[in-house]
Image (cartoon, rainbow, N blue to C red):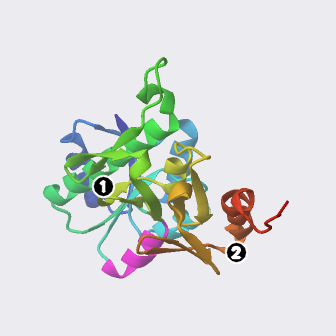
Amino acid sequence: MINCVIIDDEPLAREGIASYVKEVDFLNLVDTCENPVELLKVMDRQPIDLIFLDIQMPKMSGLDFLKIVQKPPMVIITTAFPTYALEGFQLNVMDYLLKPITFDRFFKSVSKARDYHQLITKADNPGTAAPKEGPAADYFFIKCGSKYEKIQFDDILYVEGMQNYVTIYTRKGKFITLLYLKNLEENLDAQSFIRVHKSYIVSINKIESIEGNEIFMQNHRIPISRNYREQVIEQVVSNKLWDKIKFS
């Protein structure tokens, strides 16, 4: 069950979204608020998983709230102003609903939130996804739209993070799913995969060459950021570098 709160200064807007929430069996409406200041009090009382957040409100705008709050829950913006969409997504919101909101569009949005909530719950509790005994699994599943894709660890070339999504590039193609790059990184073998950039993780064994600030594998070029370059060279190259040949 996903605990949610509606934040909107318009009573009719709150009532409309609340009526939609009641129609969805995996949503639990905890409270409704007129502004983000009231929301902070609600969040102090109990954990909140999802916020339906208006943008233009008295006391504090929805975007200002997102900029100051640390580790906010999932957020779906609900507004009549499309001009804020880009800034909203830069703040890692789950979705952006334009008023008037149809139930069909609402349900698609909360279904995305449900899928993401399930992914991060499993990532935060990895022990619940595998048996306590027996060999470690050499694969995992991700959800791509309505399809579940099996990903073999050995097939992964690299992973690119994009806000709330990751794109996993494999030998058989690329797959996009709702997941934070950090959550995926925590479940990858640190001996086999390495972070090379704030947005990229690569398979060490698939690296073919490193030149300048780029990694080459097959026809892919992955950037290495300055913060990670020293670690990449140390872990990937140094122990395998034949730079001196001794003759007896």
Measured in 3D between alpha carbons, the distance from the residue under mark 1 to the one under mark 2, in whole angstroms, is 47 Å
**Badge 2: how crowded within 10 Å, few (<14), some, or many (20+)?**
few
Q: Is residue 142 magenta?
A: no
In the displayed structure, would residue 36 be above or below residue 32? Answer: below
Local SS, label 1: helix
Residue at the spot x=21%, y=55% of the render? 108
Is 61 left or right of 170, judged from the image as shown?
right
Local SS, label 2: helix
Pinpoint residue 162: horizontal percent, then vertical percent: 44, 66
Q: Is residue 132 visible?
A: yes
Q: Quadrant of the N terminus?
A: top left
**Badge 1: how crowded within 10 Å, few (<14), some, or many (20+)?**
some
Pinpoint residue 183: horizontal percent, then vertical percent: 51, 48
Q: Which residue is mark 2?
A: 226
Q: Which residue is mark 1?
A: 14
Query: Which mark, by number, is residue 199?
Result: none
Q: Amino acid at mark 2?
A: Arg
| Residue placed furthest toward the top | 133
Q: Quadrant of residue 228?
A: bottom right
